[in-house]
Amino acid sequence: MPEDRIRIHKVETLSDDWFLLQKTTFDYRRSDGSWQRQTRETYDRGNGATILLYNREQRTVLLVRQFRFPTYGNGHDGFLIETAAGLLDQASPEERIKAEVEEETGYCVGEVRKVFEAFMSPGSVTERLYFFVAEYDASSRTGNGGGIAEEGEDIEVLELPITEALQMITDGRIADGKTIMLLQYAALHLLR
């Protein structure tokens, strides 16, 4: 049981501006039974959801391209090609991802299928990400997408053959972890 191995001593809030950054000091009981004092910083931005829209007949996927400042600050041009995604903001993962898809891509999907969930950066970020897939076709398009300008979104919608999207992983044009995971899932299970 985790509670038998962890004793929290102190939690300090370092920042509560954009999201919550905390520093926690705790004792951890190691596998040999000894206790060790540790300190960790955790960033809590809430949980999120992401989705890969795919067209089985055309063997295409819908992705988005948007500017991500943290990647720009780490030597990338900042414009990542990704699956549509967003924070849950008190909604269920299914409800939120349907709204995100429409906001970002301009497509409305009825049924979404959860394929797995994962922690994307468990060494420092608390976020659990829910992964979905859904089929789309031309009749699913209800708008232009592009995101919500007031939230700083300026999103380009990309429709790509699955073979090209997979090649873009290999040559580095797609470098987003959640997108790589869903494209590989599609290659193995949806668009073989």
Image (cartoon, grey):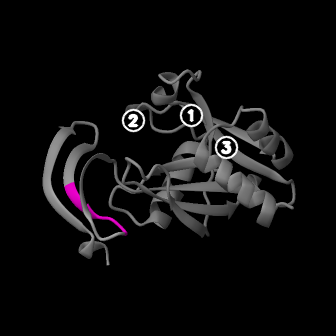
- Mostly what secondary structure, the magenta segment? strand
Q: Nearer the viewer, residue 93 or 142?
A: 93
Q: Is residue 115 shown above or below 182?
A: below
Q: Which residues are magenta?
A: 26-31
Residue 151: image tag: 2
Q: Are marks 1 and 2 in contact (CB under 8 Å)?
A: no
Mark 1, other Cα within 10 Å: few <14 / some 14–19 / many ≥20: many
Helix, strand or loop at label 2? It is: helix
**First along the sequence among labels 2 and 3:** 3
Separation (CA) of disc 1 from disc 2: 11 Å
Residue 21: x percent and y percent?
A: 25, 42
Amino acid carrying mark 3 in the image: Leu
Amino acid carrying mark 1 in the image: Ile
Q: Residue at x 59, y 50 (%)?
A: 178
Separation (CA) of disc 3 from disc 1: 10 Å
Residue 63: image tag: 3
Q: Residue at x 51, y 58 (%)?
A: 97
Q: Is residue 11 shown above or below 79?
A: below
Mark 2, other Cα within 10 Å: few <14 / some 14–19 / many ≥20: few
